[in-house]
Image (cartoon, grey):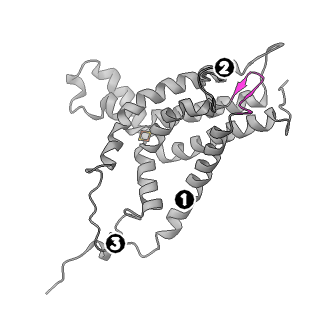
Amino acid sequence: MASVSSAADYAPRTSWVPQVLPVIAGLSVFAIYATLRALEGNYFQWGPYLSPFYSPLIDVHHRYWPFSPALLILAGPLSFRVTCYYYRKAYYGAFFLDPPACAVPEKSGRTYCGETQFPFILQNIHRYTLYLAVIFLTFLWHDAFKSLLFENGIGVGVGSLVLLINVVLLTLYLCSCHSLRHLLGGKLNCFSCANFGRGRYSMWRRLSFLNEHHMLFAWISLFSVGFADFYGRMVSCGAIRDLRLP
Ligand code: FES
């Protein structure tokens, strides 16, 4: 008589360990760097440039808040990233081994319950953090344009390009969000029956294309935001000189 197949029977023959190590390394490096920089409270402004970790800049002169101004805004971008569907999959597997990979069974004694129970059920706030992310992104676009306004007139520095590229990558990350795609059309069964159906269908198709690359945008925007801050810090503390493009 044939035996009943278990998840382990379908587990891939290759180990899942090499898949989770780069995720652990990438997220750990970013988390450590971002935490240190947010706590530092210094070297976040240089000429017309502002670090994305500190934007929007609140109470820079410490009238009401004695600590780093980055801590006042950290919850906004962080809640959007932490609850992102892609990152959830990545860190559940990499840090909690829950589950470590597709078709790899749970440790004995543990029952996989997805996100139906506390505290993971709170991840559902992602659809609301999306609105917060749109507000933060608006400030970052403002900073990117402001980075072209030097004391002696309009110009383009390497820092301006770094901030512009960063905000474009962050925009791609946000536009490829699963919640945004759902909001615009994913929840509809019939576009032609809905208000603005034609326009929504067209937007939904574009967002669906971006959505297929969400993992890529999640990673490159994570590193671009870290690099934009790092570049600014280096210029601000005098370690490197910002070049103005002719
Ligand atoms: S699902 Fe990743 S940002 Fe929304």
The residue at which mark 2 appears reads as 145
**Foreground: 9 or 237?**
237
Q: What is the span of residues highlighted in magenta in the rendered image?
A: 42-50
Quadrant position of ligand 1? top left
Disc ID at residue 110: none
Dot 2 beta carbon under 8 Å from ligand 1? no
Q: In the rendered view, tell whether residue 60 sits above or below residue 91.
A: above
Disc 3 secondary structure class: loop
Residue 231, given in percent of the width and then of the height, sits at 74, 38
Rendered residue at 85%/35% (across/down): 238
Looking at the image, the residue that sits furthest to the left is: 1
Residue 108 against residue 155 in the figure, above or below: below
Q: Is residue 163 magenta?
A: no
Tell me how far mark 3 sits from mark 1, CA to CA: 20 Å
Seen at 45% across and 28% down, the residue is: 132
List the residue tagged with mark 3.
107
The image quadrant of residue 40 is top right
